[in-house]
Amino acid sequence: MAGYIFNLDSEESLSDIIEKGVYSTKLNVPKNGIWNIPIEGTFADYLSMKKGDNVYFFLNRKVYGIGELINIGSDCKYLNFPEADFPSLVDYNSIRKELLLDNGVESLNNRFICTFKPSPDFFSNGIDMDDVLSSNQKVFGC
């Protein structure tokens, strides 16, 4: 079983993601039309995700609980719209009906999505990462 740590940008996005049970990394389309190596790594992470893998949400040095990837339909991860893995600009209105996760025009930067449930739960007050790492030093190699 794998685990994925997602770094979030705000408490608002944390609440929204946990409420929907859907996460998507924001990826800007490259000006040169070629995904860079870190983005390719992100794609590889999504492609390797499978049901039962753990997800952790990280914001301001705190972890906000544990989730577990779940299949919706046949898988736990999908392209957010057709050809979302191509490094090209698309028009929001032309793909709006095909979006799996629609957050308005910003959805164009949500190329992959993954679906999850709490396992066991998410917290409104996060746990400091130092406390997490020191909780079981043998496991984390501290």
Image: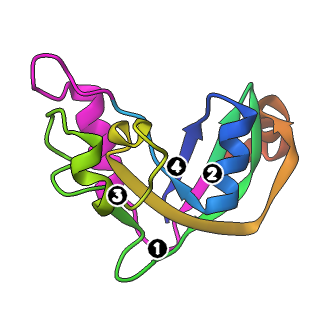
| Alpha carbon distance from label 2 to label 1 | 18 Å
Which residue is at 32% across, 54% downward?
A: 96
Q: Are marks 3 and 2 in contact (CB under 8 Å)?
A: no
Which residue is at 71% across, 68% downward?
A: 119
**Upstream in sequence: badge 3 or badge 4:** 4
101 or 94, which lies in front? 94
Q: Quadrant of residue 6?
A: top right
Nearer the observer: mark 2 or 1; the answer is 2
Q: Are marks 2 and 1 in contact (CB under 8 Å)?
A: no
Residue under pointer 2: 17
Q: Are marks 3 and 1 in contact (CB under 8 Å)?
A: no
> Please, what secondary structure does the residue beneath circle 3 have?
loop
Q: Determine crowd level at label 2: few under 14, some 14-19, many 20+ residues with C-alpha closer than 10 A.
A: some
Return the mark for residue 99. Answer: 3
Q: Determine crowd level at label 1: few under 14, some 14-19, many 20+ residues with C-alpha closer than 10 A.
A: some
> Please, what secondary structure does the residue beneath circle 2 have?
helix
Nearer the observer: mark 3 or 1; the answer is 3
**Upstream in sequence: badge 2 or badge 4:** 4
Residue under pointer 1: 51
Nearer the observer: mark 3 or 4; the answer is 3
Tell me the magenta residue range. Answer: 28-55
> Please, what secondary structure does the residue beneath circle 4 have?
strand
| Alpha carbon distance from label 3 to label 2 | 16 Å
| Alpha carbon distance from label 3 to label 1 | 22 Å
Residue under pointer 4: 4
